[in-house]
């Protein structure tokens, strides 16, 4: 089986502050390949591959914007207002994001006389990149507190591998059962670069005020996470009567998770120690 898909949508049609039309779009394109093979009378093989990419702009908006120098009293300028009913929005930058995803799946099913054995293996990978404005988190009405990946840094991404082995009884008897094992290994890398662009002003935080100049880097972080799970499980079913079935199950899982910050060199990072 070979298939493809495409979808597009938009919310706000016009970015008032920057004068950008067709703002906040989203386009998703992808394709899927699925193969099925009956290797023998009792063995079936299924292969599936999915590739998908989304390109668009997030719906984050700001409520007001002063176009003047906020560090000088009386020079704030006029607010630029927007009208949601007219599908308008404002922000210090046109948000943009891109996400690419790949999924590969293998399934083997072997029939035996009294049970069925299923083997599943999946690998999923994704990468994403983009920029959006976080100025309202600091109460700013001008410029852009641009959240994006650090310069020359690879896009953020993750990878997950899953393997499962499952045995299921298939005989017609008063008792049915399921036993299986599960393994998952996942990792991700991320980066955050908060750089201010706009007129000089003061950012008033709860415990400190920070003077902002063009190009000031508030946060510059990189990190990675790793997680994993190992599990075994089982289920017993009892056909007590024609209309009554009793099931008892058990699952034991061991989950590991680590998160490591590998870089923190922005202004706020240094203040936080």
Image (tube, rainbow, N blue to C red):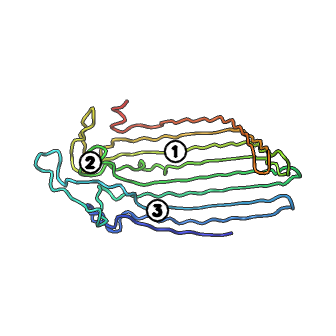
Secondary element under disc 2, as helix, strand or loop, is loop
Residue 204 in the image: x percent, y percent?
24, 39
Q: Is residue 28 above or below residue 164?
A: below
Secondary element under disc 3, as helix, strand or loop, is strand
Badge 1: few (under 14), some or many (20 or more) residues near its Cα, within 10 Å?
A: some
Q: CA distance from mark 2 to mark 1?
A: 28 Å
Q: In this figure, what is the number of numbered marks?
A: 3
- Residue in view at x 46 percent, y 49 percent: 153
Residue 118 in the figure: left or right of residue 147: right
Where does label 1 land, which residue? 189
Q: Quadrant of the N terminus?
A: bottom right
Q: Earlier in the sequence, mark 3 or mark 1?
A: 3
Q: Earlier in the sequence, mark 2 or mark 1?
A: 1
**From this viewpoint, which residue is outermost toward the left?**
74
Q: Kindly identify which numbered label has been placed on residue 18.
A: none
- The mark lying in front, picked from 2 and 1, is 1
- The one of 252 and 155 positioned closer to us in this rendering: 252
Residue 35 in the image: x percent, y percent?
72, 65
Q: Quadrant of the C terminus?
A: top left
Query: Image quadrant of residue 41?
Result: bottom right
Where does label 3 land, which residue? 55
**From this viewpoint, which residue is outermost toward the top?**
273
- The one of 164 and 193 positioned closer to us in this rendering: 164
Q: Earlier in the sequence, mark 2 or mark 3?
A: 3
Where does label 2 land, which residue? 214
Residue 108 in the image: x percent, y percent?
77, 55
Q: CA distance from mark 3 to mark 1?
A: 20 Å
Query: Image quadrant of residue 250?
Result: top right
Residue 43 in the image: x percent, y percent?
83, 58
- Residue in view at x 63 percent, y 65 percent: 32
């Amino acid at each position: 089986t070979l298939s493809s898909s495409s979808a597009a949508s938009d919310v706000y049609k016009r970015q008032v502050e920057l004068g950008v039309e067709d703002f906040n779009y989203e386009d998703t394109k992808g394709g899927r390949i699925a193969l099925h093979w009956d290797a023998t009378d009792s063995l079936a093989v299924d292969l599936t591959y999915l590739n998908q990419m989304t390109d668009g702009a997030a719906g984050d908006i700001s409520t007001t914007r002063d176009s003047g120098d906020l560090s000088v009293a009386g020079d704030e300028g006029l607010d630029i207002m927007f009208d949601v009913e007219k599908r308008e929005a404002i922000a210090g930058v046109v948000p943009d994001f891109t996400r690419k995803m790949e999924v590969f799946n293998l399934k083997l099913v072997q029939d035996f006389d009294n049970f069925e054995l299923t083997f599943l293996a999946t690998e999923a990978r994704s990468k994403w990149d983009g920029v959006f404005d976080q100025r309202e988190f600091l109460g700013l009405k001008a410029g852009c507190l641009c959240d994006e990946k650090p310069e020359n840094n690879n896009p953020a991404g993750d990878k997950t591998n899953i393997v499962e082995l499952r045995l299921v009884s298939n005989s017609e008897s008063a008792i049915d059962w399921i036993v299986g094992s599960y393994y998952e290994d996942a990792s991700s890398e991320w980066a955050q670069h908060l750089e201010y662009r706009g007129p000089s002003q003061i950012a008033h935080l709860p415990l400190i005020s920070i003077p902002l100049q063009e190009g000031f880097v508030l946060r510059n972080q990189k990190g990675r996470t790793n997680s994993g799970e190992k599990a075994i499980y089982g289920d017993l079913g009892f056909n007590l009567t024609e209309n009554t079935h009793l099931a008892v199950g058990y699952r034991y899982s061991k989950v590991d998770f680590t998160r490591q910050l590998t870089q923190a060199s922005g202004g706020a990072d240094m203040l936080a120690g």
